[in-house]
Amino acid sequence: MRRLRLLPAIWLFALLALPTTLWLLGVRQPNLQNTPKAALPAINRGSLMHGQTFTQLDGALLDRLPLRGQALSLHGDIAIDLFHDSPNPQVAIGHHGWLYYVPETATCQPNGTPLVDPATAADSADVLARTLVASGRNTTVVFAGSKLFTHPSDAPSIAPTAARCASELNSVVQERLRNTPGGLDLAPELGRLEQEGKPVFLRNDSHWNWRGRQVFSRRVLDRIRPQMAEESGLGPGAEVNRDGDLAMLMGVARRERDPALVAKRTPAAPPRAGSVLLIGDSQLERSLLDPTGVPGVLPIRDVVLPGQPSCNWTQVVAGACDDAIRQAHTIVVESVAREIIGFSESRCWRPISLAAEPLRGTPGRWERVDGGPQPGRAALTIPASGAVTVRVRPANGDGSSVPRLLRLPIATLPPAPAGAPPSAVVMTQAPQDGPAAPCATPAQGAVHGALFLPVPAERRASDLVVTLQGPPGTRLSPPQTIALDGRPAPRVGGS
């Protein structure tokens, strides 16, 4: 009985005295979960009168307490392995310990309603690929399907209605890319491997394993130039330890062995430096850009595509990739499927506007819908109000079986007053029927530049009413229509 009474004291020592002793001996807790430690509060006569000081002190001491990382990891291990429960709501535990990223269903509401029209989502990928093709570029646009839908055999039951909706949205986009000039659909090949019992995703991570990376890398390299993957000796190399990003989100360490994907040699005639641009997010980075993890073995891009630039989506949106887009003859665009909303609303317009800069189309006419005088085939002038609401009447008909780009050229743009932001024409959509067109240029501040308004296939151009806001006196030349029919479009100075 006496020994039993000592147990609470022993337990208290283990919880408090041991970490404190280790701290006094110089042992320090490193940062946890890639976040800095909470700052220690200022201790003075005034701060000691506020409860917030002690709350901050509590958090700061906890972040610095030795063994806390091990305790959190043990807590996570118990929750996952014993109770099969995830300590992070963003991660779900499937069958056989497979981990899944819950936000992969975020493209849909819990009741199964998509947050973006599926046709519009597919149109965004379609129009981007076709515009790059129309600009004369060798093009690959691919969406990486999520783990939840590519490896469903071990998937947990999370928000079933939203999951079905997100899966259908993903399927619509993939099917469109399968039939789009410049599009690439990896789903059939990845699906075949899954059906053969060969998973293409890592168990504890949201990214492909070596099989998935090999499918993507081979298809992309061979689209850049046929047989390039074989010429480079692309294939699995030595196994490396991979830390699972989903496991880290739950506060535990989960490593798995996975072969590195390596290229053995540079092709005899690699593309000219700067002619190939790789745009994408983490799947592209993991496949072609990241270190292999094998000492002395370079990333695939550095071996097969030496001197070729790459950009992530943050750089593209910020304009840091503009020159690379303009200069590239071959462009590879990758996005993960769960980002289709952001892709459609804020990402795809910039590559389209840059690639279409030198393209020219069939002249049409303006039609004002705000009661102002009709410019017809003449230039459109922004009135004293600073805004004009118009639609475009293409010369070759209101509808089309193929997507089109409406080019709205800026002829003159009065300079901004001293100290004011640079002048620009801002375009806001007010569609009369159906959703807004994806990938439209939001603003243009370059004289002789243009705003671009995509018209998806089977949509009427007249439905896409827009309001143009800019300095009074700004003039826009007659609009032009560029057909995105899978062939290079006419360019300024020639065809």
Image (spheres, rainbow, N blue to C red):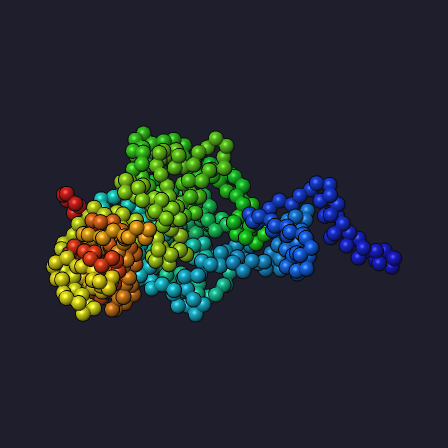
Residue 213 lies, in percent from the top left, at 42, 44
Residue 156 lies, in percent from the top left, at 51, 60
Residue 125 lies, in percent from the top left, at 31, 54
As rendered, which of 378 and 318 lies closer to the eye?
378
As rendered, which of 195 and 77 lies closer to the eye?
77
Query: Horizontally, is 344 left or right of 412 in the view?
Result: right
Q: Please give the name of the residue rendered at 13% of the width and 62% of the height, measured from the top-left corner.
A: 375
Is residue 343 visible in the rendered image? The answer is yes
Q: Please give the name of the residue rendered at 39% of the width and 34% of the height, measured from the top-left corner.
A: 302
Query: Horizontally, is 206 left or right of 357 in the view?
Result: right
Query: Horizontally, is 94 left or right of 162 in the view?
Result: right
Q: Residue furthest right?
A: 2
As rendered, which of 85 and 18 lies closer to the eye?
18
Location of the C terminus (image quadrant):
top left
Judge whether 282 appears above or below 81 on screen. Answer: above
Q: Please give the name of the residue rendered at 36% of the width and 31% of the height, measured from the top-left corner.
A: 266
Q: Residue furthest front?
A: 418
As rendered, which of 210 and 247 lies closer to the eye?
247
Residue 341 lies, in percent from the top left, at 37, 58
Res. 362 image quadrant: bottom left
How many numbered markers are drawn? Answer: 0
Res. 21 image quadrant: top right
Location of the N terminus (image quadrant):
bottom right
Q: Please give the name of the residue rendered at 20% of the width and 57% of the height, measured from the top-left corner.
A: 473
